[in-house]
């Protein structure tokens, strides 16, 4: 008789785990509390346009995601705006006004007037010093933990490359992608992203990010609307109790965010519980403004850059700066994306108030957004894990503990939120169960 496993959570980690277990010949059931699979990679369709509500891209160094996409028939396409490729699609709002600048492009960096020459030299030397660190990868927790000495990315940047180089370059490798401040992040993350920035590009599924998890879920028994309450041991294995009853299993993969895991009664050690309690998340709010008419935003992408806190990451016109053919001709969707601290300020406000506040933030940045024909506000209370200084070492220690029967997966177990780390954690958890 084949073994039976239950996976709790149908995000990238849970679905990747379920796929490995199913391929092994096991009987697998996935229980998801939400209404659709995908977690924070979901896509939504509004007014006939499919839009990424959460994660928006893979990178060229997401090797496992790219490999799975090829295996599963998920077609990938390059967006029209790439980091490291300067052009006139994006401008940065700085204390010196709007500037065309691409932090990932060497010629652009060398000509950028707001970073002193000595700091540019120190930054380039730092980049070169990270070239030999071939194992260093954003989804390799052990490689990150080795650099996590308790110093923040901001403090490390000030010390190693200088204040201006930190504000205008280093912070751009962290804050726009993860929504937390560089001052709150371990220096290991910034150092790793500098290593990746030497050569990288973006890719996105042609059917939206949600199509990746849809493909992972093919052939897997996924039950949505099933919130798990408890996992208990019994004579033959485990009982998984949920809103609609219970399931019996030989093993369980817990692939939910840390806040959700804290709400489930599960047989974990005191050390595991203590580590789970330390996991922090950063929120984010995304405003989507839809136009059923031609609208021209100039520039198509406007981003704040420089010292101090910025309420929004920027404004983007998806017809010219998103994936090709995403927006039908004669229409437009503009997005406004917040930093975490701004999302916390807006938490609990109604959609009208949030839309008005973010439209005002855009105006302060220099972008007067036309009145939209429709809009969507997408709040994420737990958008990304915050890799606080020291937390990567803690999560690495958690990952080394041996568990049997009930195993952990999810981006939080990797210390940083990427689709790649989620997928890798899910596959590793499944292999751990199969090996007993």
Image (cartoon, grey):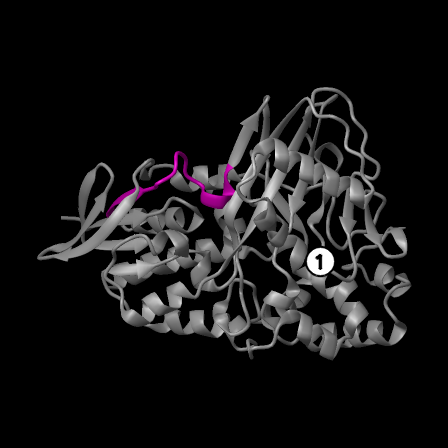
* Quarter of the rendering containing residue 125: bottom right
**Front-most of residues 75 and 297:** 297
Give the image location of residue 32, x and y in percent: 34, 41
Residue 221 location, quadrant: top left
Highlighted range, magenta: 26-42
- Give the image location of residue 314, x and y in percent: 72, 46
| Visible residue check, residue 130 | no
- Residue neighbourhood size for the residue with mark 1, other residues' Cα within 10 Å, grouped as few (<14), some (14–19), many (≥20): few
Q: How many marks?
A: 1
Image coordinates of residue 267 in percent, x first then y, are: 23, 61
Residue pictured at 38% horizontal, 57% vertical: 409
Q: Which residue is mark 1?
A: 309
Relative placement, left or right, of 355 versus 404 is right
**Residue at 42 percent of width and 56 percent of height:** 410
Looking at the image, residue 58 sits to the left or right of residue 359; the answer is left
39 is within the stretch colored magenta: yes
Q: Which quadrant of the rendered structure holds the C terminus?
A: bottom left
Q: Is residue 73 above or below residue 197?
A: above
**Residue 168 visible to the viewer:** yes
Residue furthest to the left in view is: 235
Q: Is residue 301 left or right of residue 6?
A: right
Residue 367 appears left or right of 134: right
x then y, percent, for residue 52: 57, 37
Image vertical order of residue 45 relative to residue 191, above or below: above
Q: Does residue 54 show up magenta in the picture?
A: no
């Amino acid at each position: 008789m084949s073994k039976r496993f239950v996976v709790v959570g149908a995000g990238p980690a849970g679905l990747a785990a379920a796929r490995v277990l199913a391929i092994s010949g096991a009987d697998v059931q996935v229980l998801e509390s939400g209404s659709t699979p995908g977690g924070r990679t979901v896509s939504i369709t509004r007014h006939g346009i499919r839009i990424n509500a959460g994660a928006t891209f893979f990178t060229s160094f997401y090797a496992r995601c790219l490999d799975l996409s090829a295996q599963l028939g998920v077609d990938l396409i390059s967006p029209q705006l790439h980091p490291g490729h300067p052009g006139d699609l994006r401008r940065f709002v700085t204390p010196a006004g709007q500037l065309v600048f691409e932090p990932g492009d060497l010629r652009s960096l060398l000509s950028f007037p707001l970073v002193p020459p000595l700091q540019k030299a120190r930054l380039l030397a730092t980049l070169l010093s990270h070239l030999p660190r071939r194992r260093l990868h954003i989804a390799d927790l052990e490689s990150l933990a080795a650099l996590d000495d308790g110093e923040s990315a901001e403090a490390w940047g000030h010390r190693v490359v200088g204040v201006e180089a930190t504000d205008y370059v280093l912070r751009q490798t962290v804050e726009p992608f993860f929504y937390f401040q560089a001052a709150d992040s371990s220096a290991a993350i910034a150092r790793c992203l500098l290593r990746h920035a030497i050569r990288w590009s973006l890719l996105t599924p042609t059917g939206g990010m949600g199509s990746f998890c849809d493909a992972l879920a093919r052939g897997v028994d996924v039950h949505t609307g099933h919130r798990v309450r408890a996992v208990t041991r019994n004579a033959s294995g485990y009982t998984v109790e949920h809103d609609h009853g219970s399931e019996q299993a030989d093993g369980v993969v817990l692939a939910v965010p840390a806040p959700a895991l804290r709400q489930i009664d599960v047989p974990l050690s005191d050390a595991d519980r203590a580590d789970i309690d330390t996991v922090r998340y950063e929120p984010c709010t995304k405003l989507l403004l839809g136009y059923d008419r031609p609208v021209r935003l100039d520039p198509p992408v406007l981003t704040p850059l420089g010292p101090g806190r910025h309420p929004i990451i920027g404004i983007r016109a998806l017809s010219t700066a998103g994936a090709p053919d995403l927006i039908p001709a004669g229409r437009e969707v503009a997005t406004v994306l917040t930093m975490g601290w701004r999302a916390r300020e807006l938490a609990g406000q109604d959609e009208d108030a949030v839309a008005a506040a973010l439209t005002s933030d855009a105006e302060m940045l220099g972008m007067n957004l036309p009145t939209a024909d429709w809009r969507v506000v997408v709040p994420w209370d737990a958008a990304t894990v915050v890799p606080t200084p020291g937390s990567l070492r803690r999560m690495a220690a958690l990952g080394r503990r041996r568990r049997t029967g009930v195993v952990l997966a999810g981006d939080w177990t990797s210390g940083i939120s990427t689709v790649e780390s989620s997928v890798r954690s899910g596959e590793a958890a499944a292999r751990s169960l199969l090996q007993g």
